[in-house]
Amino acid sequence: MSHTSTPLPHADGPARAQCPYCGVGCGLEMKPPTAAAAGSEALWTARGDRHHPSSLGQVCVKGATVGETLDRNRLTTPLYRQRTDQPFAPISWDLAFDLLEAQVRRTVAEQGPAGLAMYGSGQFQTEDYYVANKLIKGALGSNNFDANSRLCMSSAVSGYVRSFGSDGPPCCYDDLDQADTVLLIGTNTAECHPVLFQRLLKRKRKQKQAVQIVVVDPRATATSDAADLHLAIRPGTDLALLHGLGHLLLERGGVDRAYVQASTEGFDALKELWAGWTPERVSRFCGIKQQQLRQLAARWAESRAVLSLWSMGVNQSVEGTATVAGIINLHLVSGQIGRPGAGPFSLTGQPNAMGGREAGGLARLLPGYRNVTDAGHRAELEHHWGLAPGAIAPESGLTVWEQIEAMERDELGLWWVAATNPLVSLPWLDRVRAAVARCPMVVLNEAYAGTETAAVAHLVLPAMQWSEKAGVMTNSERRVTYCPAFRAAPGEARPDWAIFAELGRRLGFEEQFRYGSSAEVFAEFVAITAGRVCDLSGLSHGLLQEHGPQQWPFPPGTAPGEGAPRLYTSGRFPTASGRARLISEQPMGLGEPPDRDYPLVLTVGRYLEQWHTMTRTAHVERLMRPHPEPLLEVNPADAQEHGLIDGARAEVISRRGAVTATVQITDRIRQGTVFLPMHWGAAQEQACEANRLMHELACPISQQPELKAAAVTLKPIAAPSMRTLSHAGDHPVLRSESKS
Ligand SMILES: Nc1nc2c(c(=O)[nH]1)N[C@H]1C(S)=C(S)[C@@H](COP(=O)(O)OP(=O)(O)OC[C@H]3O[C@@H](n4cnc5c(=O)[nH]c(N)nc54)[C@H](O)[C@@H]3O)O[C@H]1N2
Ligand SMILES: Nc1nc2c(c(=O)[nH]1)N[C@H]1C(S)=C(S)[C@@H](COP(=O)(O)OP(=O)(O)OC[C@H]3O[C@@H](n4cnc5c(=O)[nH]c(N)nc54)[C@H](O)[C@@H]3O)O[C@H]1N2
Ligand code: SF4
Ligand SMILES: [Mo]
């Protein structure tokens, strides 16, 4: 069986695909290497695809350099070891599948299907996601499939479902050209969704008054540098700010009574809640000036079209889902939704986190925005998959943190990780490491060698990545792009979906997993989305190849280019009553507030040039240059209080661990808050494992952990004296340190 569809003939021009980094999902044109000089690397080169409707030829520095990441440091064969203190040895695929199959059978016999768990990724293509879910939730009857979207978009998903009755971002990128106010809350769009931000800036530069930009972030960032108004609130106080804004909208007559009456429910309770959030109270709670809040309210009330964009500063919080509702409430009450330039718009992090949601890629979901706890939804999938009634378990599976806890109790016989690097990206890493060490078999599908998660695995399977396997991805504006296989994969690497399908066949589900290509997988998937909010049933690999990227909903008969740019334009919502729900919840504050012993809030985020755990971006010199090491951002007042010197090393200590980093004293971060980047895991030369410090407390509705805030304290690390330094050459401790 072939694992890829036929590579594009390069004679026809460059290969076109969606960029495999962020959720903007820009179109790239990839050109094959020209005859390389002897000894130099033959690299594919990327440039913006002017035909891609989401990006119109624009790219950022990561997209532009993706060609340099594809060949370096790749895994080429399956690797195995019985115990994690042994070295890996290469093995055949056949033996790898024998080992996997035996462990699945043993686990199911001893512990039942609940002893199996998989942890996947928004960097899967939709076909990978779909086959993984069919295998785990369908064939094996365990709902323990979760993905790194739990750390990322889960609060947005829960927020949309609670307010609108379904997941699905209602806006599109054209709204950036139509809005007259853009609220950027908890998002460093300039660094994390650069091409969207440039689109906004371009408009602003042309006509300064056409659009006002408001940023809510405890730090000054490249994003807030372009803002007309920056509200540097105390971390974790967004919901109070939003309620305070509602309070002022009521006062200023910023309510769209007709919309509220026709299209919402719950206004009376919300009015009462908002009444209590006076500007004085909000100003004290959030640590901002009343005047700033009033300015924002005036702007909102006077705007024809308000667009709110948000990402991790909102979602990664113990009240993430409530804050998402707080944003949506304001749009509903002021009628700022369902028309050009207006609406609440979550910026998706990963290139295909959207496709993951469509394909059922969280522990509570089934494909087509369905739910495992809904008997009707289970029956539809069991029928579609040719499985016996009752094959799918009726209860929600384990979220990734619950999977960690299950390993602590020796309840998992197999933990299968794919396309994510949890030994960098999960909170409380020391606890994660100890839990995973108890699991009898840890399997990892990975494209690159030597990741932090491979260090805790028994079996490592070499995965094909983007450019080597054909499949689709959906970006933040619901646009689906076909990504062809246009390069040969290294060694024996296989697509994730093909690995899952082969195991399915070996376990006796020949019929269910007899796929000849990813196009067949996609056809089977889209059929089950018919009639759902995320209706992709009119799409196929062929249509996407011929007509280019398309937005959903796209039922059969939709003309190419005619997928819906916006949802809910009629003011009707997929709830029982057809009305959207206004949700009234009081702010709770941070899961781990600062106190006397740990007086500062650590927040952890991203740099423009790095992608997550650096497996790809650390190999590109141009990307390493701007930030050769992670920096601890500290406000001058906090630096003085803790005796820190700019450029010297400091220890950051939380209840769970300590790390060291170089200090950058800057008034761009608010007093009481410090910042570290998330990127440098244990495998990096300048390792600074920020997530050793973070806690696991999560939003009770979305189960998304509060990866944006933990209480910490700081300690200077004394610089070695000149005398010590002059003897460093013979000093065993200093010598080993200087190597690391
Ligand atoms: N360059 C780059 N781009 C990326 C990625 C990458 O790794 N590198 N990853 C992609 C992914 S998966 C994601 S999810 C997105 C993330 O995109 P963003 O969410 O924009 O990125 P972060 O830096 O994680 O966090 C955004 C901001 O939240 C602020 N913040 C912290 N606490 C609070 C708070 O309590 N309230 C508010 N209002 N703000 C707060 C931080 O100071 C930070 O500036 O980026 C995507 N794009
Ligand atoms: N404190 C703190 N922690 C965070 C965050 C934060 O803001 N603060 N952000 C969170 C968020 S939003 C996210 S999305 C996560 C991201 O965290 P991770 O998902 O752990 O980060 P990545 O480095 O993107 O991991 C993806 C892995 O998949 C591999 N890979 C790439 N393509 C393929 C493929 O096709 N198949 C397979 N099998 N492997 C492939 C890559 O080499 C890489 O090792 O981190 C989360 N952790
Ligand atoms: S903005 Fe995002 S999708 Fe676009 S080129 Fe940059 S990383 Fe890729
Ligand atoms: Mo993310």
Image (cartoon, grey):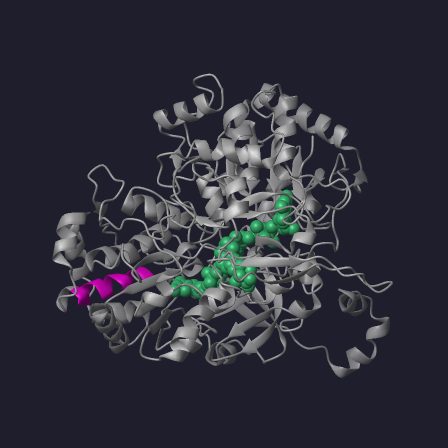
- In the image, the segment drawn in magenta is 238-249
Q: Which of 40 and 100 is in front in this view?
A: 40
Q: Quadrant of residue 235?
A: bottom left
Residue at 12 percent of width and 57 percent of height: 257
Q: Main secondary structure of the magenta part?
A: helix
Q: Is residue 410 above or below residue 488?
A: above
Q: Does the magenta stretch include residue 247?
A: yes
Image x and y of residue 47, in percent: 61, 63
- Near-viewer residue (17 or 219): 17
Q: Residue furthest bottom?
A: 722
**Residue 648 relative to residue 206: left or right:** right
Q: Which residue is drawn at 25% across and 52% down?
A: 585
Residue extending furthest toward the top? 388
Looking at the image, residue 483 lies above or below residue 226: above
Judged from this view, the residue extending furthest toward the front is 12
Residue 42 picture quarter: bottom right
Quarter of the figure that contains the N terminus? top right
Q: Which residue is drawn at the image coordinates 27% and 62% (left, top)?
A: 242
Residue 122 can be seen, yes or no: no
Whether residue 200 appears in magenta in the rendering, the answer is no
Q: How many labels does the image show?
A: 0
- Residue 130 position in % (x across, y down): 52, 35
Q: Please say if 196 is above or below 350.
A: below
Query: Could you tell whether 413 is left or right of 267 in the image?
Result: right
Could you tell whether 132 is left or right of 382 in the image? right
Q: Residue at x 72, y 77 (%)?
A: 720
Q: Can residue 527 be seen in this view?
A: yes
- The answer to whether 305 appears left or right of 538 in the picture is left
Q: Where is residue 181 in the image (x, y as percent from the top left)?
A: 30, 69
Q: Where is residue 696 in the image (x, y as percent from the top left)?
A: 48, 49
Q: Classify the position of the C terminus by image quarter.
A: bottom right
